[in-house]
Image (cartoon, rainbow, N blue to C red):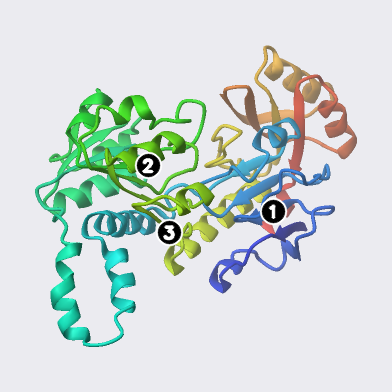
Amino acid sequence: MNKVALFCKIPKDVMNLFSQDKYDIIEQETSEADGIVMRSMDIHDMKFSRQLKAIARSGAGVNNIPVDRCAEEGIVVFNSPGANSNAVCELTFLALLISSRKVIDSIDWTKNIDKDVVESVERGKAKFVGPELKGKTLGVIGLGNVGHLVANLGIKLGMEVIGYDPYISVKNALGLSWDVQYTSDINELYRRSDYITLHVPYGNETKNYINKDNIKMMKDGVKILNLARSGIINEDDLIEALESGKVGYHVSDLPNEKLLSTKNVVCIPHLGGSTFEAEENCAEMAVTQLTEFLERGNIANSVNFPDCSMDRYPGTDRIVVLNKNIPNMIGKITTALASNNVNIIGMVNKSRGDYACNIIDVVGEVNEDQLRELEEHYGILRVMLIKQKAEQQ
């Protein structure tokens, strides 16, 4: 029976995905856990036992997980891309309206009216006049699970939309409205946009993606939204541009001390995926991916190992090997199995970057000693055995 530690609340309907005959649920205890389901808790300093095989993040971001260390320890890390996309898309358009209509400022002003409310409102509302979104140009940087939805909704609201994403997937490209103007020149997007919204992951390529050099290309008074990740905007450059008026407004779903003390900035407390529907979708995706791996060895939406899956051959046991992507690994694995009179019926091998996964269906006697012997080969990070009877239970 697999033990799964919960580091976050899971909706009741999603908990039913853990069948009682296959899973023992424990709370925030890793020493005996085969898997972890988590959300926002930071586990960088946590020590993992050898028994831990997988971590499933209920959400897209994995900056709170030591992904590289997990890979070296043969721990598969899953995330839940796209499960909260609609929630983030909706909040993006709330942010667009906030940046245009001075809604927050006007609400704060209204709360402080202590008499003659109706007359005061009529006299004072002119100071909060702002532009409509219709007819304005929206630049969408990143056309992934969220970005392509934002671009399409912008078209429906009558905006002119420019999209930029050199890595757009075929699926998202096909889902993009024909009215979205795709550009391969991000500088064109900077020059033409009245609003710029960011929907890219944080990494070496996107660190300080928005900075003083490209802010100079933008329209005076441009509104910039960040509902993606901290670090993709150079905040010192942004604050300087806000104070000079070059950037008219900034809405962030990632507040910090600097932004909270800057004028013309509205900070939302990281509510992008905070809807009942999104939290349930993320949890369901995370749990499904975790159980599929623990029960069948199949990998989908891992951030440190390749997607790898295979239908089970009838009457076989299954061996899953996670290894470094170095030469002759398949030869080592097959030779070791053959030397123990284990016959391979079906096999799939996938690699991505520095790591690889092998799913092997076999017949013949396989025991733990043989697996440990295989695991001792250089470059092999983990070997799992999934017995036929265990899957059928």
Which of the numbered marks, if any, corresponds to residue 268? 3
Viewport quadrant of the C terminus = bottom right
Indicate the position of residue 34 as horizontal and vertical percent values: 76, 51
The earlier-in-sequence mark between 2 and 3 is: 2
Residue identified by numbered label 1: 36
Q: In this view, does 273 lie to the left or right of 366?
A: left
Three-letter residue code for mark 2: His
Mark 1 element type: strand
Specify the quadrant that holds the N terminus: bottom right
Query: Is 42 placed left or right of 108 in the picture?
Result: right
Where does the image place residue 382, in percent across and percent down from the top left?
76, 33
> Farthest right residue?
369
Query: Which residue does the image show at 52% across and 42% down from the upper left?
Result: 301
**On the image, which quarter does residue 240 sit in?**
top left
Of residues 104 and 120, the one nearer the viewer is 120
Which residue lies under the disc numbered 2?
A: 199
Amino acid type shown at disc 1: Ile
Q: Distance between the residues labelled 2 and 1?
A: 27 Å
Task: Quote the CA–CA distance across marks 3 and 1.
Answer: 29 Å
Q: Would you call the spot at circle 2 few (<14 residues within 10 Å), some (14-19), or many (20 or more)?
A: many
Closer-to-camera residue (381/141): 141
* Residues packed near mark 3 inside 10 Å, few (<14), some (14 to 19) or many (20 plus): some
Q: Earlier in the sequence, mark 2 or mark 1?
A: 1
Farthest bottom residue in view: 115
